[in-house]
Image (spheres, helix red, strand yellow):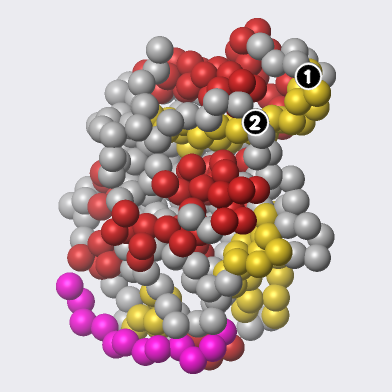
Amino acid sequence: MTPFQYARANDVADAIRQIATDPSAKFIAGGTNLIDLIKYDVEGPSRLVDISHLPLRSVEPTSTGGVLIGAMVPNADLAYHPMIEDRYPLLARAILSGASQQLRNMASTGGNLLQRTRCFYFYDTATPCNKREPGSGCSAIDGVNRINAILGTSEACIATHPSDMCVALAALEAIVHVTGPAGQRSIAFADFHRLPGNTPQRDTNLEPDEIITSIELPPKGFSANYSYLKIRDRLSYAFALVSVAAALELDGDTIKDARVALGGVAHKPWRSSAAEAALLGQRADATAFMKAADWLLHGAKGYGHNNFKIGLARRAIVRTLSQAARGTPQSNSDKKIR
């Protein structure tokens, strides 16, 4: 591990000042991903700026009927917060399907948005990786790519985004509030994470000298008809091969509003406006859900070891939408596809 300095930020302005004056400095909150990256020599910051004590730990209602979540709220506290459990159970279920209890106790809400890919080659510094070292190549494209992306890939990168929480936040159309030297700004969740393109080293549209201060949830929480399904190799402490967050608003059997987001299949939580539009006004049944799956997976491409993800994702989408329509959300302990 490369030696580094440690400093604690007193407030948001101090945190921004410290990170802006040292291009190689990194923020650290829970540290559940960054410490691993330092140990693997993927990251080598000259200084860690500790933001874990910043007063960003509240979960409070907004004047527009939504909820504002402080960036330092631990994942476990957020999942079990009464407002989240009651009004946004899709988010609570997604959080509790991720990591372990110990990690959820440490990981911050803002940090969850900034997790880096778990692509094997990203962590193996003996192999080329455009995300770790731009221009070096992508070892995953012709390598062991079972966990890699099938949608939104580029010739430079086929890495996936690892978060469960972000898949639910994408479906709920959250808003990310950030602050930097130029002031405050808000980023729609759909625009926060990036596809790899020619710059796979950039995971998000957050600038290096900006800090996430809060995440805002709009009023609509889809608390009656939702489901989060995570398919993985073992029941706990594993990243998704495919995950689906589904939320429906129904009028009888007719779909009035629909949101579907996929995890484990792309460089960012994956949505399709065409798929969601195709569901509107339709009867909530398998026929409509299979059409939505076709739209969501339009253009999907396997790279050999991960070809199975296309069929797996199609079945998972139909199952998750069916559970949402019935009001029988996925159990955290049942991960089987039937």
In three-dimensional space, the C-alpha distance between marks 2 and 1, rounded to whole angstroms, equals 12 Å
Task: Identify which residue, 13 or 316, lies in the foreground.
Answer: 316
Task: Identify which residue, 135 or 54, lies in the foreground.
Answer: 54
Q: Is residue 95 left or right of residue 172?
A: left
Task: Give the mark nearer the N terminus: 2 vs 1.
Answer: 2
Q: Is residue 56 left or right of residue 77?
A: right
Instruction: Determine if the magenta segment contains residue 7.
Output: yes
* Image quarter (top left, top right, bottom left or bottom right) of the N terminus: bottom left
> For residue 207, what is the image quadrant?
bottom right
Q: Residue 227, relative to residue 186: is it above or below? A: above
> For residue 242, what is the image quadrant?
top left
Residue at screen point 48% across, 55% down: 80
* Image quarter (top left, top right, bottom left or bottom right) of the C terminus: top left
Where is residue 280? Give x, y as percent: 79, 23
Which label sits on residue 225? 2
How many residues crowd mark 1 within 10 Å: few (<14), some (14–19), many (20+)? few
Q: Which residue is mark 1?
A: 252
The kind of secondary structure element at disc 1 is loop
How many residues crowd mark 2 within 10 Å: few (<14), some (14–19), many (20+)? many
What segment carries the magenta color? 1-12
Residue at screen point 49% across, 67% down: 73
Residue 280 appears in the figure: no
Please, what is the three-letter code of the amino acid marked with disc 2? Answer: Asn
Instruction: Determine if the magenta segment contains residue 221.
Output: no
Where is residue 328? Give x, y as percent: 55, 26
Residue at screen point 80% across, 23% down: 251
Q: Residue 319, relative to residue 39: is it above or below? A: above
Where is residue 92? Give x, y as percent: 51, 47
